[in-house]
Image (cartoon, helix red, strand yellow):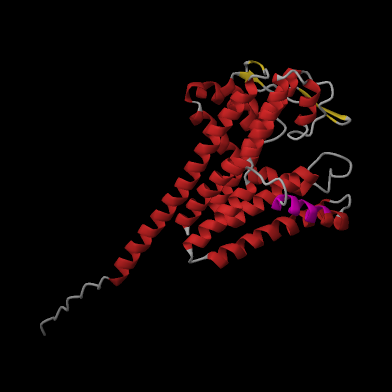
Amino acid sequence: MSRSRAVGLLLGFAADRLLGDPRRGHPVAAFGRVARGLEHRLHGDSRLRGTVHTAVLVGGCAGIGVAVEHATGGRPLLHAAATAAATWTVLGGRTLEREALAVHDLLAADDLPAARQRLTHLVGRDPTGLSAGEVARAVVESVAENTSDAVTVPLVWGAVGGVPGLLAHRAANTLDAMVGHRTARYERFGWASARLDDVLGLPGSRYAALCVLAAAPSRAGEAWRAWRGDAAAHPSPNAGVVEASFAGSLGVTLGGTNRYGDRVEHRPVLGSGRPVRPGDVPRATALARRVDRLAAVVAAGAVGAAGAVVCLRTRRGASWGTRPLPARRLRVRAPG
């Protein structure tokens, strides 16, 4: 199944790049409706209730993935198709790029009010009063963070866990976006979803940063220094890593003051370059595109290579098991 998993990951990635997210009937939207309905039944100012909410929804998606893997086991074409469908469902690289460039087009047309409004498709911060440069910074930060959340992290879990890994991560990431906020309603109830998303994102965010270094080798030194020097100051253990590496690679400075309704956050400065300008948005999406392609190829290649090693060891073990054991020589002692 390793070979069909690798093929499925690549096909699903290609489908996302060509088609993006469907405008209607997206499975993630259906999951969101189910999650909201369960929240109405379970919500309370309690970490235990939030943990149950997370466990039921993430565990349910993982269970669906296990059932799909079981149903397609032993049928490589069907398994590859199922993996491709799940990969396309959970990835969001193409849609992220479209939204980022849509904001850039509005900035290029000097329509700042429309650019602020379109920015709400990408980030949760309040865009009121943002300058063109601040809107562009928000876009670049979103491109960086979501390159990890919507591409490299799911690819890692798809490579490791197949369809169950893909669906479970998307469920956890969606729940974090829905309830993982530091507000009066979700401070305790959303704790489990936020922590689970952080844990699941740890390997994929580092993988994204490594891909940034490889995708722009001429700026790898600057990206590495920003990653090592600035990422730890970010409140997110994952977003800081990939945002810092993007900042170093692009030669810009990210971070600053963000407003979320009545709450204001002062994010640490990432990178040592100049402030972000609107023209940096296409540069950020181009870097993200290279990172996405590299991440997909390496993840699929790693799955295929691991499967080949397992297959080779299995064959060697089987051939050794059928080899006749050497006959023991009988030593006859002379009497006396």
Q: In this view, does 309 lie above or below 108?
A: below
- Which quarter of the rendering shows the C terminus? bottom left
Q: Is residue 66 above or below residue 286?
A: below
Q: Nearer the viewer, residue 282 or 297?
A: 282
Residue at 43% x, 55% y: name it.
Answer: 307
Q: Is residue 25 above or below residue 316?
A: above
Residue 312 pos. (x, y %):
35, 58
- Is residue 145 magenta-colored? no
User: In the picture provided, is 125 more to the left or to the right than 276?
Assistant: right
Q: Nearer the viewer, residue 86 or 273?
A: 86
Residue at 88% x, 49% y: name it.
Answer: 45
Is residue 111 shown to the viewer in this render?
yes
User: What residue occupies the far top of the structure in this picture?
Assistant: 274
Q: In which quarter of the image is residue 292?
A: top right
Residue 180 pos. (x, y %):
78, 43
Query: From which residue to which does the magenta span run?
Result: 26-36
Residue 316 pos. (x, y %):
32, 62
